[in-house]
Amino acid sequence: MTELLDRAVERVRALSPEKQDEFARVLMSLASEGEEIYRLTPEEEADLIEAEAEIERGEIATDAEVAAVFSKPRP
């Protein structure tokens, strides 16, 4: 660890746990080198679970249905 980073970490350690978590999220985001971390909302997670269940049951769109959606004019 560089001296500058070490000093920054020492300053952050003096902050509240909530502020420390904020700094940690920013640092992790910067260190991910373009790999963004996306957190699903509870609603998005529920939708994903339902979509996976539909796939398991074989409830998927046919090729014709997908083509029909993509052939519609877009604004």
Image (tube, rainbow, N blue to C red):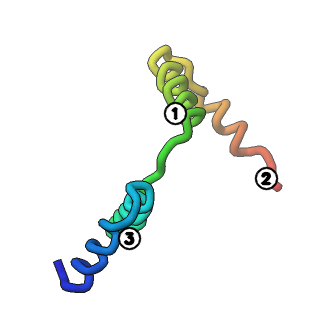
Could you tell me which secondary element the residue under label 1 belongs to?
A: helix
Three-letter code, disc 1: Glu
Image spot of residue 6 (x, y percent): 22, 78
* Mark 2 burial class by Cα count in 10 Å: few <14, some 14-19, many 20+: few
Q: Based on the displayed image, in which of its 4 quarters is residue 18 positioned?
A: bottom left
Decide: few, some or many residues near mark 3? Use Cα within 10 Å; few <14, some 14-19, many ≥20: few
- Name the foreground residue: 47 vs 42: 42
Q: Position of residue 63 (x, y in %)?
A: 59, 32
Sequence-wise, the earlier of marks 2 and 3 is: 3
Mark number for residue 74?
2
Which corner quadrant of the image does residue 50 belong to?
top right
Residue occupied by mark 3: 30
First in residue order: circle 1 vs circle 3? 3
Q: Quadrant of the N terminus?
A: bottom left
Q: Amino acid at mark 2?
A: Arg
Is residue 59 or residue 18 the one in the foreground? 18
Secondary structure beneath dot 3 equals helix
Considering the image in quadrants, where does the C terminus appear? bottom right
The disc at residue 64 is: none
Q: Earlier in the sequence, mark 1 or mark 2?
A: 1
Q: Give percent across and percent down for residue 12.
A: 34, 69
Give the foreground label among 2 and 3.
3
